[in-house]
Amino acid sequence: MTTFVRTTAILALLVLPALGAAEELTKRDARGPVTVVATLMPPAAAGEPLRVKVALDTHSEGLDTIAFERAVAFRKPDGTEVAPSAVETTGSGHHRQTVIVFPAPAPATPIVIVVKAVGGVAERVFTWQALAR
């Protein structure tokens, strides 16, 4: 019994911080009839492109008319917006997701992803602190 409790406690210490870190990478905005979920996919090394998975979910309207390459942008600290360099879309109808690729951000730059005009919401902003290198 003591071994079981000790093993369970050790596993909890190893697994729970990893779950917390994963949760911080995912941000959700449920305003309006469309829920938007953005998950940062940190690059493995400096200089690699930035990848963000964006998922749209609704039960009240079709999402097939949304062009991710126009609706999603990376906002730099000076306010300029960078369009995606690639978009890998899957799903249709009420459930769509995509991995959006942007050029590598400068070191120590906060990651700000903007989703515009989806589900009647003018702008949704998802922000992460600068990526650890």
Image (spheres, grey):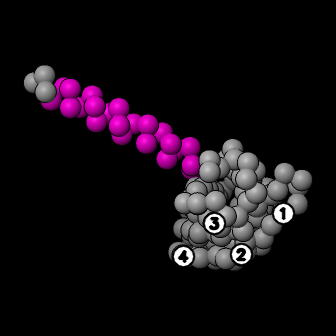
- The residue beneath circle 1 is 81
Q: Amino acid at mark 2?
A: Ser
Residue 101's quadrant in the figure?
bottom right
Majority secondary structure of magenta residues: helix
Front-most of residues 34 and 14: 14
Q: Is residue 31 above or below residue 96?
A: above
Horizontal relation, residue 10 to residue 102: left or right: left
- The residue beneath circle 4 is 90
Is residue 60 among what the camera can see?
no
The residue positioned farthest toward the top in the image shown: 2
Front-most of residues 132 and 57: 132
- The residue beneath circle 3 is 48
What residue do we see at 62% from left, 51% from top?
133
Q: Amino acid at mark 1?
A: Glu
The image shows residue 3 at horizontal and vertical percentages of 13, 27
Q: Amino acid at mark 4?
A: Thr
- The residue mark sitting in front, 1 or 3, is 3
Residue 63's quadrant in the figure?
bottom right
Span highlighted in magenta in the image:
4-29
What residue do we see at 43% from left, 42% from top?
18
